[in-house]
Image (cartoon, coloured by chain):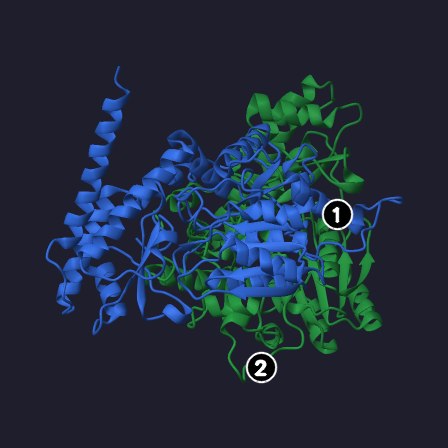
Chain colours: A blue, B green
């Protein structure tokens, strides 16, 4: 029940125990095509270039940035947590001139603040995290696409922590590049990074295509600014996933089976239903920790559905409580980074773990462990408050059902 | 039965269906430590820095090269097949001044030729493929370490195609950096790159360590030549796998479970026994294709144990034969690249597929399909020749057993 990685859905684990297929076996390439189509639904996009980068979510970020950014390009990174620092760091390594704006951890940016910075910096690319687990905040993105389009700026976001647990619309929100991971609300393991790229992003990337020296022919264009990485060269990766089937890496077959199953589960459930499930169980966990008497960190109005940060009560050893939860109850909750280190725990309700039983069990166990640690907790307050959220929900559902009866 | 990826060992697939663990769960970090120790046995090294890069074998190559090479460094790449071109390509993207020497496909280099080039080029790094599946050749490496040491050159090799199927000794042969993959003789899926680095390589890499801007403190050294990639920054990855447990990527848990099981299987079997198994079944397949009357490509004395390239008989449509083998017999064999495209098939005997039943079945099926394609084949010649190799081996084993009896 940490901020991820979390337990995988057993269906995903079963899919990953399937025997391998050859790289160009028609069954394998059809699975690749299916996976592209499934992730179009997950990202809510019609982008042709919707595929997997073979590595962890950080690999997806680096593939997007190194393929879009040429050395010297200006990049604007609004930072509201640890993963904003990571975007800055990766963009710097790509040779970008990086400009940042920052808010205190626990806050997000207004669209006006981001537009003002865009006017000042005139970047080629806006790179912003959607949901930053380090602070639990979700940056509103729905107005940023129009702002980027008005100023001719490419718009990239990392949705590793937020996708499938919070509303996200790649096309409607005007995204040019989006990367994710499986290990949060997608209920899979780390190691594959679903990603999608708009036609505009594809144009920028393919203009930098370079053909390997070994197979370059006289007359082939040689780009002035080749992508600095071979492994993360999206121009080549597009051709690997596309009808050309250019031989690049050997697709990580088992991770593809896993990523495909993650998306199949979500598409079967329905993206709206999956997000609603995360909203419900996140609300129950939030009410529960508050019901125990714990204080919640940050601007709750902008909190992601799938994670909550709670202050460690005074006098309580945060690491000892976490160790006891893990050892005695088999429940993991998260520590935190940077300015929040030692101050808050982070508790997730995501993917396969966004369930009523996991929420109630975690709240009961947390109460027990906190009491043993000498903290003052409201007896039964966590579980009761969570039950109340579920009861309200059931009542509302009955009313909705009654309202649609003829 | 292609040149890889091949079928995974069912034990590996079962290991990959295990439920996930938290990133810093003591069970998880103990698995990471176990995996390091297991791969020391596989690579035959005492290198502390023996770990997994989270990506395909190509990710391992890029991590090694981008972490070792600073822009402007001279790198010597002896090219004897497609994957030599890949090393050149990746080294160029790292900003290296790359010098190449080449031999015709199907040949390997003498140590003298490589030493002469080292004297001429005076590179910082020699980067050479061990076994190149594109030609089936294995470049002898055993004398190159001493040559590199004498000239102060770092020595890197890619053993993706050869490891565990052919003799390899990281320490005894003087390697500074070695990267591999799971999808060949290790009997696992693509997606994790085991790698090992000598103390000398670690010194070069850690001298380039840069601390993320977000957590850099006054007084921290700032390197003049930071590693150009964050994801492949081995200095950070060493700290992630080491006692510091620096938070870098989220380890690809399922791939780690798979990589660990691949090494456990090999260590249980014994590395010498695993290599001998590949030698035996490779010899049976070689004799078998020759027994069918097919001609073998390249310098057979330097062929890898685990793959053979055979000329497509005149008048036979190579792709049609491959498709029939796959569709009607469920057996995949490989096509080929570059100068060999359309001329040879590549047939593997590696990992879980290095077995008597797979060799005999493939030869029987190949004979059937070739006959239907109108090729002239020796009836029963493939299976008989392979059986003869196994019979000779059994006789030799009996004699060895008899000789050690008191």
Q: Residue at x 58, y 55 (%)?
A: A115
Q: Position of residue A388 (x, y in %)?
A: 17, 44
Frontmost residue, B356 versus A40: A40
Vertically, is A251 above or below A403?
below
Q: Position of residue B92 (x, y in %)?
A: 75, 60
**Residue B122, can we see it?**
yes
Q: Residue at x 47, y 42 (%)?
A: A168
Considering every residue shown, the one lying at the far right of the view is: A218
Q: Which residue is mark 1?
A: A209
Q: Which residue is mark 2?
A: B221
Q: Chain of mark 1?
A: A
Q: Chain of mark 2?
A: B
Left or right of residue B389, residue A294 in this image:
left
**Residue B168, can we see it?**
no
Label 2 Cα neighbours within 10 Å, binned few <14 / some 14-19 / many ≥20: few
Label 1 Cα neighbours within 10 Å, binned few <14 / some 14-19 / many ≥20: many
Q: Residue at x 62, y 57 (%)?
A: A118
Q: Residue at x 67, y 36 (%)?
A: A245
Vertically, is A381 above or below B207?
above
Considering every residue shown, the one lying at the far left of the view is: A379
């Amino acid at each position: 029940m940490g901020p991820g990685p979390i337990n995988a859905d057993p269906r995903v684990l079963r899919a990953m125990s399937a025997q391998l297929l050859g790289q160009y076996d028609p069954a394998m390439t059809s699975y690749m095509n299916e996976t592209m189509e499934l992730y179009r639904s997950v990202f809510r996009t019609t982008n042709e270039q919707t595929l997997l980068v073979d590595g962890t979510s950080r690999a997806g970020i680096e593939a997007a940035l190194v393929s879009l950014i040429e050395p010297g390009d200006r990049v604007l990174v609004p930072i509201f947590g640890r993963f904003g620092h990571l975007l800055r760091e990766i963009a710097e390594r790509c040779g970008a001139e990086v400009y940042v704006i920052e808010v205190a951890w626990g806050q997000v940016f207004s669209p006006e603040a981001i537009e003002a910075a865009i006017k000042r910096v005139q970047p080629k690319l806006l790179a912003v995290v959607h949901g930053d687990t380090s602070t639990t905040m979700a940056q509103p993105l729905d107005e940023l696409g129009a702002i980027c389009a008005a100023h001719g700026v490419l718009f990239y976001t990392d949705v590793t922590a937020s996708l499938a647990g919070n509303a996200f619309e790649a096309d409607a929100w005007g995204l040019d590049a989006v990367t994710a991971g499986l290990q949060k609300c997608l209920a899979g393991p780390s190691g594959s990074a679903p990603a999608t790229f708009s036609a505009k992003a594809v144009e920028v990337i393919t203009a930098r295509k370079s053909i390997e020296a070994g197979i370059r022919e006289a007359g082939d264009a040689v780009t002035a600014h080749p992508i600095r990485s071979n492994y993360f060269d999206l121009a080549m990766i597009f051709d690997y996933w596309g009808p050309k089937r250019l031989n690049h890496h050997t697709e990580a077959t088992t991770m593809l089976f896993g990523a495909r199953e993650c998306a199949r589960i979500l598409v079967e459930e329905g993206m709206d239903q999956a997000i609603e499930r995360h909203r419900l169980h996140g609300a129950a966990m939030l009410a529960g920790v508050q019901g125990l008497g714990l204080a919640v960190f940050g601007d709750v109005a902008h909190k992601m559905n799938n994670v909550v940060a709670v202050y460690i009560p005074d006098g309580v050893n945060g690491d000892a409580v976490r160790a006891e939860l893990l050892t005695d109850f088999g429940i993991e909750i998260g520590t935190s980074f940077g300015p929040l280190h030692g101050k808050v725990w982070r508790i997730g309700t995501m993917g396969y773990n966004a369930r009523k039983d996991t929420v109630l069990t975690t709240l009961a166990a947390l109460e027990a462990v906190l009491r043993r640690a000498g903290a003052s907790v409201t007896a039964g307050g966590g579980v009761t408050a969570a039950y109340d959220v579920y009861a309200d929900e059931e009542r509302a559902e009955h009313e909705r059902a009654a309202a649609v009866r003829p």
